[in-house]
Image (cartoon, grey):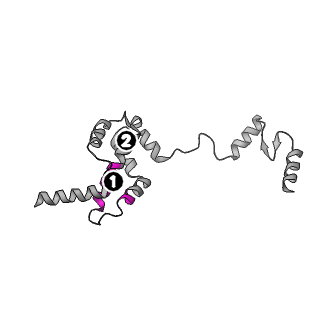
Amino acid sequence: MLRLSTVLVLCSCPADRVAGLGLRRDSADATATNKWWPFNSQSQAVPAAKATVEGAVSIESAKDAVLMSAAFGRKTAALCRDAPDDERRRCRQLAGQRIFCTLLKRHEKRYRGMSGAAQEKAKCANIDIMEEATEAANDEKLQREAAEA
């Protein structure tokens, strides 16, 4: 019954005004539509993190933008949830560096023209991204304690 009533309503409307939708673009109709519709192609906002990374002139500013994002913080927190309290901060730093190196490798074309990209790539060449951050933090602590002894 609902289908039949819908079909009858749509058939009874003029061809250019089906259910209130302006299918014909007269200049007066287009102007009225633009006045009440809050979104258009010029007003849609670009996500802040993506705009920051692509608009960055140096790899450091891009890295800061990525490291400060909420999603990145959640990922490093999840990776370091099993780390002891005294190692958790260093674990998150190491996890962040590893994740950024993975990101840099995946999106190399995006970062290629930025100043400092070659140096950051060289730093990443020395980092084993397959080692867990909690293990790396623990290894670093053991090495530091061995050097002090």
Name which residue type carries label 1: Ala
Disc 2 on helix, strand or loop? helix
Q: Residue at x 39, y 44 (%)?
A: 103
Give x and y (percent) for residue 41. Answer: 61, 40
Which residue lies under the disc numbered 2? Answer: 104
Amino acid type for the residue under numbered disc 2: Leu
Q: Nearer the viewer, residue 14 or 148?
A: 148
Residue at 72% over, 39% down: 31
Looking at the picture, how far across and down is residue 146, in whole percent?
A: 13, 59
In the picture, measured across the screen, residue 18 lies left or right of residue 128, that is: right
Asked where in the image residue 122 lies, by quadrant, the reply is top left
Magenta span includes 85: yes
Q: Position of residue 113 (x, y in %)?
A: 37, 33
Please report the residue visible at 52 percent of the width from the left and 44 percent of the height from the top: 46
What residue range appears in magenta? 76-98
The residue wearing badge 1 is: 95
Q: Quadrant of the C terminus?
A: bottom left
SS class, disc 1: helix
Looking at the image, residue 82 lies above or below residue 14:
below
Q: Is residue 22 left or right of residue 136?
A: right
Q: Give the quadrant of the N terminus.
A: bottom right
Gap in angstroms between the C-alphas marked 2 and 1: 14 Å
